[in-house]
Amino acid sequence: MDTKEIIETSIATVSAAGLDNRIASFVAEREHLLEPRYRVAFIGQFKTGKSTLINRLILKGDILFTDIMEATAIPVEISYAETPRLELYRYERKPVSGSETSGDYITGVFLDETIDRPSVEQIRQSTSGETPEDRAQRASTYSHAKLFWPAPNLRQFTVVDTPGINTPNAAVATTTYRILPECDLAIFVAPPKQLSAVDLQFLQRRVFEPGITRAMVVLHYDPRFTDRSPGNLQNIKGAVQASLANIGRASIPVTLAELAREGAPGQNALGQSLVESGDPLAGWPEGSAMTSSPVTDFETELVSFIQENIRPGKEEKIRARLRRQLEGALAECQVEMGLLEQDERTRMTTIETIRRTQKDSKKSRHDIRDDIISDLRQLQTSHLLHLFKGFDKIEEKFQLDVNACENLELVQNRLKSAKPILQMEVETLALDARKSITEEVRKLEGTYAVRLRDASQQWRDLDVALKIDGGFLERMPLLLVQVLDYALMVVLSPFPIFIDLFIRLLAEKIPGLGKLVPTNLAKALLQKWVISNASTQFALAKEEIKAKIAEAYAEAERKLTQEWNALAAEQEKTINNAADRSLHPSDPARIGILREVVQTIKRLLAQLPPASTLPPL
């Protein structure tokens, strides 16, 4: 059964069951399936060359802003248009009714500004910022930008340029997490080395598990700084393929792309023909009209991958969401059917018990959620102490090393070697903190999974069939794992800033020492200056790190609260709808209808991929 047939059958089935509140979600999936548009996301850590690749392969010019530091602050969707245009979409936050003081809100977006024929500078100002604070402010204000550009290959698909997954700005990172579920295929751009723990966790949790099944890893290298020997490049490629296999993704292709190739402005690197049909891929047959410009092996490989995978990727993602929606419909039918199978007196008693259990369960859920948040705040405190103790040790060692220098030349040499030494020490501290935090989060997952199972025992004790397939009781421990993993990723994201802070330290000018100053005095003056400067910079670094850690934990807490409450509300609505309908059954044949609907939904679920974890709400 193809995807469209599953959707049409699902609509007819939930309609026959009277689940009118669920029809809209299936209709939305049908519209998404029929939409003649595909989205390709370029993702990866910041400064891996995502924007550069899009400029050279897609836009054929330096259109998107690139920089030696982090550049992209908000996702940029790039589509075809005859006349260039830039649209900026702003967040619109409205408090949830009755929860003005709880921090819960409904998020929407609206078109805030349109710039016709934007200059490269206007694009830069709209999608980036001069400082990390500017980028964070822009990311928290704007959800995304849409750039329309007359690049012929954009007739085939929309390209999405995203901020780096390990950006020090939590607000910037969140925009990447939000936009990915809307994409159909991912191009993960990385430097030519083994994938890090952050890379693999991001791919697993933020790409594959939410439903994106098709992806390519591009190792983007600059031949001026990379060993280009075939053996070295193949060894790197093999190591990346092995790490993907370790997370069950051996089928993900890995390819190499050279950074320094010169583009040809105005030429179509992908060489696709113009398309008039409703489906852009319909005009993209094998061997369709290529331009006379030279096409690299990588460009050919990328074109072939997109051609072969973007439509299946879109359908597989839709089918994953259909499973979630069908599981909800099945749960609602099973609860109602279980109640209707009881006689009227027993049913009324059971519904009263359900209401009491819901009330008790709601309190238990809130208590557990609040305890998790409390533990996260304690983790934030211990995390900061861990980092500060590490910084104090690094500073103390730095001072001892400077004071131990016996002459001016040794002091100067110590300064010259300070950058790689400090960088290594800070990276070691970051890895040590990462390991410690990861272990603590895993302990929290285990502890609260047990508490959730214990809290759900009252549901399992009910006589009615309320062991809902894929429902709250089964999903909440999985939600906990997902949200805490999200928290872990957000919390760990500030680590790259450490190195930048120490680069600032070394950027200070060494004070000039006149030739008439005695050598010993010059040494003492330089030692005093270095230690004083270092103390100031370490203090500033600690203040910035404290602010970044607080920002990261606040974002993780907000995410946990939002998704926890949404899932609980979904489950409560499912049970209440079923219980309300069973109070006044209008059709004597209702239970028979429900039995048929349950069987149909189970047959549909058998056509869909198994859900290994909870997709994002």
Image (cartoon, helix red, strand yellow):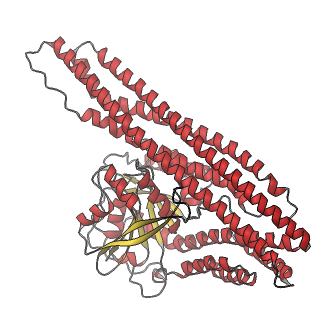
From this view, report whether residue 400 is shown above or below residue 584: above
Check the picture and name the quadrant holding the N terminus. Answer: bottom right
From this view, report whether residue 193 is shown above or below residue 331: above
Q: Position of residue 33 (x, y in %)?
A: 56, 79
From this view, report whether residue 209 is shown above or below residue 398: below
In depth, the one of 578 and 11 nearer the eye is 578
Residue 603: name its quadrant: bottom right
**Residue 239 showing in the rendered view:** no
**Residue 581 showing in the rendered view:** yes
In depth, the one of 250 and 106 nearer the eye is 106
Q: Position of residue 351 (x, y in %)?
A: 82, 67
In depth, the one of 111 and 565 nearer the eye is 565
Q: Position of residue 553 (x, y in %)?
A: 50, 45
Number of numbered markers: 0
Q: State the residue lying farthest toward the bottom.
A: 276
Q: Is residue 6 left or right of residue 63?
A: right
Q: Is residue 601 left or right of residue 543?
A: right
Q: State the residue lying farthest toward the left.
A: 516
Q: Is residue 28 left or right of residue 166?
A: right
Residue 601: name its quadrant: bottom right
Check the picture and name the quadrant holding the C terminus. Answer: bottom right
Identify the residue at horizontal 33%, vertical 40% (top origin).
500
Q: Position of residue 339 (x, y in %)?
A: 85, 71
From this view, report whether residue 4 is shown above or below residue 293: below
